Image (tube, helix red, strand yellow):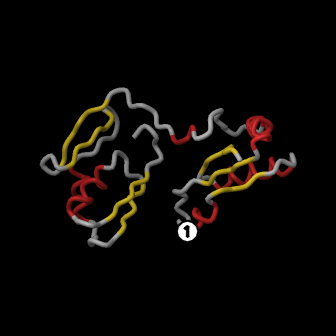
């Protein structure tokens, strides 16, 4: 089986599934049950897969319907390269960040946010929309043993 589409948009998965069903192309949706654990946050992407021999026909059908389907499997996971970035530090150098030179940038607000989180050594914290990960990285040295997962939709970050 080959990955055809990866998205956290349930409407897009439903639309693509309907198109494939109408064309009588066998498919499966991977990670649907994992995604349901997150509630309505939509942070975990679902993957629509088809049989190897149906991949090109399925791509053509979805593209004809206006869906963005990359040519290479896993193309969604490749982050864009940030052209100009700076090296910045927080917490007296304990946190080092590489962040875009322009646009929104992490500063002391990340330190304050991390300080406000009530976390213990066995907690697992989910930082959604973590940007460059500044708050995430500021929390981990403060609470030894605490696990932090950062999620960011902007591939350039």
Q: Residue at x 69, y 56 (%)?
A: 29
| Residue 80 drawn above or below residue 20 | above
Q: Mark 1 points at which residue?
A: 37
* Number of numbered discs overlaid on the protein picture: 1
Residue 84: where, in percent of width, then height?
A: 33, 27
| Residue 45 drawn above or below residue 87 | below
Q: Which residue is drawn at 46% across and 43% down?
A: 154
Label 1: how many Cα within 10 Å (few below 14, some 14–19, many 20+): few
Q: Residue at x 70, y 40 (%)?
A: 67
Looking at this view, name the residue that lies furthest to the top.
Answer: 83
Q: Quadrant of the C terminus?
A: top left
Relative side of 63 to 22, left or right: left
Residue 43: where, in percent of width, then height?
A: 51, 56
Say what secondary structure mark 1 lies in: loop
Residue 2: where, in percent of width, then height?
A: 69, 44
Relative side of 79 to 103, left or right: right
Q: Residue at x 21, y 48 (%)?
A: 95
Residue 53: where, in percent of width, then height?
A: 79, 40
| Residue 112 drawn above or below residue 80 | below
Relative side of 60 to 156, left or right: right
């Amino acid at each position: 089986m080959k990955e055809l589409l990866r998205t956290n948009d349930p409407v897009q998965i439903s639309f693509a599934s309907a198109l494939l069903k109408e064309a009588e192309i066998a498919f499966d949706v991977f990670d649907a049950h994992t995604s349901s654990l997150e509630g309505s946050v939509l942070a975990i992407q679902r993957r629509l897969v088809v049989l190897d021999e149906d991949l090109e026909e399925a791509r053509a059908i979805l593209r004809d319907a206006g869906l963005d389907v990359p040519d290479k499997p896993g193309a969604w996971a490749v982050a864009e390269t940030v052209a100009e970035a700076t090296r910045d530090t927080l917490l007296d150098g304990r946190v080092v960040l590489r962040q875009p030179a322009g646009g929104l940038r992490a500063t002391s607000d990340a330190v304050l946010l991390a300080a406000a989180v009530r976390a213990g050594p066995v907690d697992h914290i989910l930082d959604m929309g973590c940007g460059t990960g500044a708050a995430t990285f500021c929390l981990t040295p403060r609470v030894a043993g605490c696990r932090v997962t950062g999620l960011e939709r902007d591939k350039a970050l």
